[in-house]
Amino acid sequence: MKKTVGLISVIVMFGLTGYSLFHGSQSKSEVKKTTATTYSFEKKTAASTSKKTAAQKALPDAKTTDWNLVLVGPKNKIENEVAESQLATLSDNSHQVDSRIVSDYEALSEAATKAGYPLVIVSAFRSVEAQKKVFDNNVNSLISGSGMTEADATTKTKETITEPGYSEHHTGLAMDIVDQDWYNSYTTQVLDASYGDQPGAKWIAENAPKYGFIIRYPKDRQDITGITYEPWHIRYVGKENAEYITKNNLTLEEFLQQLSDK
């Protein structure tokens, strides 16, 4: 009887020891698994933070309130029209821009001439008053020539002419330019989207950012800018900003959003 009790005690002891060893091993395994998962999560979080930080560092040191980043367009009416004292006449003696961009534009023009694409300025600064005259004349022309109602004529005019107060030309930072060959030989109208396929237009798109200008209304971005493709319309934003915007295929609206988010 004593032998039987002793044997049972031994069996129970080994059973408890086995249970303890099994669960102790399982606990260590779970700890390892949990530690690995935590490390993996922390690693991913660190990588994500690192990427975001890198993107923020890549952004130019600019603010949405900078004078050269003012946003004017179909949904953004100009708040303060550029003062007449702030305007300067370009070397062609017929167009004005904000005096702070004159030297950069003249440098762009000189580079274009050397490359074989001398530039012709079609339009630069336009006051709100001047824009209103152009807009109203077109409306009246449609009413008298096509018999449209004033409402229909206004809607039609907005398709091709910016409503007064909503044109970038009011800022003195925007210009419509083409190269001389195109200006002398165009068959439809000088400001036509087909200009974008010309060598001169391609040169402008590639080189303008070096001097602080961007193609303000790129192809297939109307949903963001509100304006169809205009390869002739350049806008001054500053050299560093222009190169960043062009390199990353952004619109001005998207760039300003990035600056707001940083």
Image: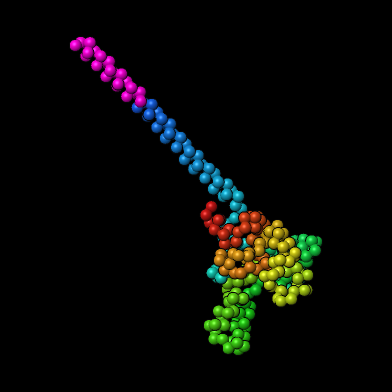
Q: Residue 205, position in %: x, y?
A: 69, 62
Q: Which residue is drawn at 29% across and 21% down?
A: 16
Instruction: Please check the rendered image and state whether residue 153 is part of the magenta-colored stretch, yes or no.
Output: no
Can residue 27 be seen by looking at this rendering? yes
Q: Which residue is drawn at 73% across and 69% down?
A: 178
The image quarter in which residue 140 lies: bottom right
Is 48 left, or right, of 207 in this rendering?
A: left
Q: What stretch is highlighted in magenta?
A: 1-22
The residue closer to the viewer here, 91 or 143, is 143
Q: Which residue is drawn at 74% across and 76% down?
A: 187
Q: Magenta stretch mostly in which secondary structure?
A: helix
Is 161 left, or right, of 95 in this rendering?
A: left
The residue closer to the viewer here, 237 or 16, is 16
Scheme of colours in the image: rainbow
Q: Residue furthest left?
A: 1
Work out whether 43 lies above or below 92. Answer: above
Q: Residue 119, position in %: x, y?
A: 75, 67
The image quarter in which residue 104 lies: bottom right
Is 6 left, or right, of 251 in this rendering?
A: left
Q: Which residue is drawn at 22% across and 10% down?
A: 3
